[in-house]
Image (tube, rainbow, N blue to C red):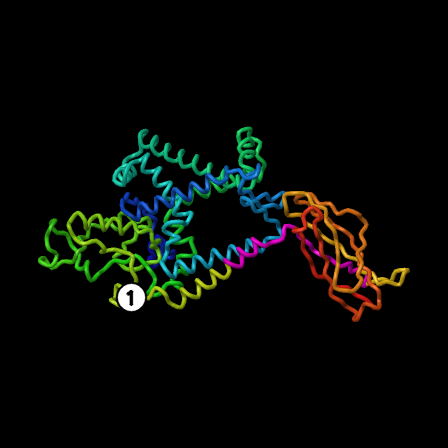
């Protein structure tokens, strides 16, 4: 693990130059495989999340890819929903929901996201699994790395990195498959006819996966992830964290199995360091809460297994709170949890309602700014507008345009029939005419409405300004 150190001056031969070492050279971490309830939960989360990522891209819905972000066509398909650039608000709202969810669950239960659902954790677990299958367990990996270079060592290392690279490229291919139909993308890859951007993102995302999960690993969590730095702002003494019980465990020391620790003046911790060996970031949880801890609970499983073997009670390392460790009552329901929860439910409810009730036709009314108004030969006041009509539904519609807000307001268009195919954007020139006697001010609010003739439920209105003398 990298740990900060004070600058160490080193005199050069000329006595003038100084070399400063701010960080130790990274020591590779070999996490020991651990079994237990939290390990099973973590493996289940990895399988589910990877299954969703690699599997959803191949699902079909109404003859198309179920989840597809079609950037050239400016359409975003999510199962039965189709989103357009005008619906960007919903994406922003969903990002807000994600941030609020992170705040809420962190305040309540610590770093659950980091330990079980973060992409860095998920893909690192997958890469560790492949590494163990090829190189062996922790001891064999350490022995292999310390052994001199040989054909056998090269073959094992080459096999591991080959499998890693293939898996990383498949990850990059799947990622791009959410933006280019994945079946079409697969055909392009087989025929070596992918476009420059498709090729770039497959390689870039594949390289990022290979580098982050295969090489950097805990360095991403410790140094690159900003969440590790600001998580303390969301923690308090009632937040659920992974903690070692020093009152029970200290003083630590080895002893024979079955020995009563009090009879030899020791605590329950036998100083086996299993909690350190299984930690993916290489920390010692017995040193207290540290920002490097990602909350994976591997140390809990490891310690519980050791306690079982020596017939001591479990829970020397456990999910708890600072208040519980200090003997104070833990308050699960507290102001910050209520605030985060209320805001989260409010925003999530608003987003859900907005998506469920959003109109299937979009309408923008743009007033002609070249002229305020004009008077027709019949003495009527006329304003000119451009209507931008977007058909968001999956069927063609014939629209009728009406206007209200001024008595006897009439609508004139150059096209007798406003026909819009699915996904089509129309620019329609519209003239609104009103009798001057019906205008009570120089500026009046009017509402332009479009309604589908083949489906009366498809309708929307937009406010506009009508100017007169």
Left or right: 227 with respect to 407? left
SS at mark 1 in the image: helix
Query: How many marks are shown on the rendered structure?
Result: 1
Judging depth in this view, the residue of 80 and 390 nearest the camera is 80
Q: Magenta segment range?
A: 348-372
Say left or right for 179 vs 216.
right
Percent of width and height locating residue 227: 42, 57
Tell me where residue 427 appears, x and y as whole percent.
74, 50
Indicate yes or no whether the magenta region holds residue 39.
Answer: no
136 over 289 or under it: above or below: above
Question: In this rendering, is residue 396 above or below 344?
Answer: above
Q: How crowded is the residue under tag 1: few (<14 C-alpha within 10 Å), some, or many (20+)?
A: some
- The residue positioned 38% from the left and 52% from the top of the image is 114
Observer able to see residue 347: yes
The C terminus sits in image quarter:
bottom right
Given residues 417 and 427, the one toward you in this image is 417
Question: Where in the figure is residue 207, as x and y percent of width and height?
Answer: 46, 41
| Residue 350 on the magenta segment | yes
Q: In terms of image quadrants, where is residue 295?
A: bottom left
| Residue holding disc 1 | 323
Classify residue 352 as left or right of residue 321: right
Q: Which residue shows up at 18% across the image and 59% down it?
A: 250
Viewer can see residue 20: no
Viewer-nearest residue: 257 or 273: 257
Q: Residue at x 27, y 54 (%)?
A: 284
Q: Which image quadrant for residue 33?
A: top left
Which residue appears at 89% of the width and 63% of the height?
379
Extreme right residue here?
Answer: 377
Q: Quadrant of residue 289?
A: bottom left
């Amino acid at each position: 693990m990298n740990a900060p150190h004070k600058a160490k001056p080193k005199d050069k031969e000329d006595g003038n130059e100084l070399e400063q070492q701010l960080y130790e050279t990274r020591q590779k971490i070999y996490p020991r495989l651990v079994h237990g309830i939290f390990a099973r939960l973590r493996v289940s989360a990895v399988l589910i999340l990877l299954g969703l990522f690699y599997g959803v891209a191949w699902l079909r819905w109404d003859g198309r890819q179920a989840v597809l972000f079609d950037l050239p066509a400016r359409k975003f398909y999510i199962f039965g929903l189709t989103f357009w650039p005008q619906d960007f608000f919903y994406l922003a709202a969903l990002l807000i929901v994600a941030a609020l969810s992170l705040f809420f669950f962190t305040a309540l239960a610590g770093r659950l996201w980091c330990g079980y659902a973060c992409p860095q954790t998920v893909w690192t677990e997958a890469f560790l699994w492949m590494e163990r299958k090829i190189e062996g367990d922790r001891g064999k990996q350490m022995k292999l790395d310390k052994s001199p270079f040989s054909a056998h060592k090269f073959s094992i290392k080459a096999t591991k990195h080959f499998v890693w690279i293939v898996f990383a490229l498949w990850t990059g291919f799947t990622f791009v498959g959410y933006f280019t139909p994945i079946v079409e993308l697969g055909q392009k890859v087989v025929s070596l006819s992918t476009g420059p951007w498709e090729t770039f993102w497959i390689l870039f995302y594949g390289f990022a996966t290979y580098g982050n999960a295969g090489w950097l690993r805990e360095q991403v969590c410790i140094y690159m992830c900003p969440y590790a730095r600001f998580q303390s702002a969301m923690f308090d003494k009632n937040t659920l964290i992974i903690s070692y019980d020093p009152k029970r465990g200290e003083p630590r020391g080895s002893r024979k199995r079955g020995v009563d620790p009090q009879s030899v003046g020791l605590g329950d911790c036998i100083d086996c360091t299993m909690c350190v060996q299984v930690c993916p970031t290489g920390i010692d949880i017995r040193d207290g809460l540290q920002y490097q801890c990602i909350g994976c609970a591997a140390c809990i499983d490891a310690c519980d297994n050791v306690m079982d073997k020596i017939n001591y009670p479990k829970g020397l390392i456990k999910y708890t709170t600072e208040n519980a460790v200090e003997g104070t009552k833990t308050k699960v329901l507290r102001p910050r949890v209520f605030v985060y929860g209320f805001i989260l439910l409010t925003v999530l409810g608003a987003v859900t309602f907005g998506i469920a009730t959003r109109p299937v036709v979009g309408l923008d009314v743009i007033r002609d700014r070249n002229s305020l108004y004009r008077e027709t030969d019949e003495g009527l006041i006329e304003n000119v507008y451009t209507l931008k009509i977007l058909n968001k539904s999956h069927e063609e519609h014939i629209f009728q345009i009406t206007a209200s807000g001024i008595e006897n307001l009439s609508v004139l268009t150059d096209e007798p029939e406003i026909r819009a195919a699915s996904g089509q954007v129309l620019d329609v020139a519209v003239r609104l005419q009103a009798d001057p006697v019906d205008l009570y001010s120089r500026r009046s609010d009017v509402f332009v409405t479009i309604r589908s003739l083949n489906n009366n439920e498809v309708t929307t209105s937009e406010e506009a300004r009508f100017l007169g003398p």
